[in-house]
Image (spheres, grey):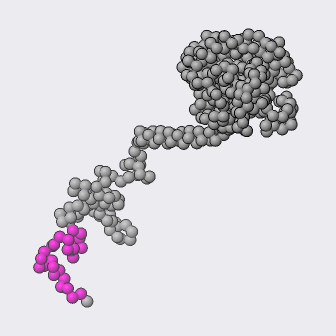
Amino acid sequence: MNEWPEGRYEDSRGNRYGRGSTSAQPEGARVMRQVRREPGGVGGPQAAPPYGGVPQQPTYDQGYGGYDSGYNTGQVYGGQGGHPQGPGGAGPGGVRPAPNWGRRIKWTAITLITVLAVTTVATYFWADSKLHRDVDLSKVIDRPAEGQGTNYLIVGSDSRAGMSAEDKKKLHTGSAEGKRTDSMMILHVGDNGDTLISLPRDSDVEIPTYQGSTSGKVYQGKGRHVKLNAAYAEDGPELLVRTIEYNTGLHIDHYVEIGFSGFANIVDAVGGVELTIDKGFKDKYSGADFKAGPQTLNGEQALAFVRTRHAFAASDLQRTKNQQKFLSALAHQVATPSTVLNPFKLYPTMGAGLDSLIVDKDMSLWDLGSMFWAMKGVSGGDGTSMNMPVSGSTGGNLLWDKAKVKTLVNELKNDQKVTVTGN
């Protein structure tokens, strides 16, 4: 039983806003102006209440300075214009904002630079670890004074280290024990042009007093004259450097040596070397069998080309010319974009080369790179290539032209443009 008198508050206080009403009709829009009525309004025809007679809830006007904007959609007050966002953070109407290309380009550039820097540093340490720094030039005694520029002694040896019997047969190297020098070159790198000078292995030289590379014992010179390659056979790279310095007066700054197998592997890794042979020749000892004209030499053919000497009348001099020609072509081939920009070719080439090189203890990758680019420059016509000047022969040994050699050495020491010509 309802104890409240009907219409108590209506009678005593009047129709109060927000307190409800006992009237069967809803409050008028005068009382709650923020309520938006559907067509028909107060007193007009009303649609039948849906959902079993439950009246439809009013919608709130987005007036009042946007205070109620977005209330029914769950949007936080203070949003951009009160508009709801589309799916995935899109703007009004589901349209995504334009991408910030400046920011994307910036971070892409930073990422690329970081990757490049890390790759470069990793490559440097990888390459540096592969160098065999086995030659100690500090054991060379009575050395001439250093000159301007840098002088490299580049040696090709007949070392068969690591080669199988099948490899020796394929490359026509024979099976001699130990190792000897098949080619020797001095590369001078300076500000007035680079110069590549071949030293014939049959050059007549005097063995000076020297300190044994392993025993440390000093062996007195007795005026013995031998072929240049005999110095290497007697006590290795250190005596070879000592002998060249003694007979020329030129200071050797760095030593680089490569054997048969390493040479062939480099050529194969780079995909062969393009070369034009002026005149065809054959040599059963080296396995050479070439026709005249342009061709691409693989590792086996390249080794035969640089070793051949029995097919020529002036055997040693022509051989040194072929060696210079091929090494220049090899340097040019390695430096082409197809090799440098292709990691699948560059890294195998670097690996094959660095694995097979023997250098002095002070040789850095920077020094090695300088030597390589100088050889490439010589092949491109930016320098001079020549044989050591020869005046004749005695007992099968080639005699150097002492006057020309003296002039040549002075020009190299002072880093002057070379005016001397060789054979």
Quarter of the figure with the C terminus: top right
Start-end of magenta stretch: 2-27
Q: Residue at horizontal 61%, vertical 34%?
A: 363
Q: Quadrant of residue 15?
A: bottom left
Q: Residue furthest left?
A: 12
Q: Is residue 18 rendered magenta in the image?
A: yes
Q: Is residue 367 left or right of residue 83?
A: right
- Where residue 71 sits in the image (x, y, percent)? 31, 60
- Where residue 310 sits in the image (x, y, percent)? 84, 18
Quarter of the figure with the N terminus: bottom left
Q: Residue furthest right?
A: 284
Q: Main secondary structure of the magenta part?
A: loop
> With respect to residue 195, does 358 lie above or below?
below
Q: Is residue 324 rendered magenta in the image?
A: no
- Where residue 325 sits in the image (x, y, percent)? 71, 19
Q: Is residue 4 left or right of residue 197?
A: left
Q: Residue at horizontal 73%, vertical 17%?
A: 321
Q: Quadrant of residue 371?
A: top right
Q: Quadrant of residue 280?
A: top right
Q: Is residue 149 left or right of residue 17?
A: right
> With respect to residue 87, does 177 lie above or below?
above
> With respect to residue 277, does 128 lie above or below?
below
Q: Nearer the viewer, residue 316 or 379?
A: 316
Q: Residue at horizontal 66%, vertical 37%?
A: 133
- Where residue 410 sits in the image (x, y, percent)? 60, 16
Can the viewer see residue 405 in this picture?
Answer: yes
Q: Is residue 279 left or right of residue 387?
A: right
Q: Residue at horizontal 66%, vertical 11%?
A: 404
> With respect to residue 5, does 314 lie above or below?
above
Q: Nearer the viewer, residue 251 or 190?
A: 251
Q: Nearer the viewer, residue 332 or 419?
A: 419
Can the viewer see residue 302 in this picture?
Answer: no
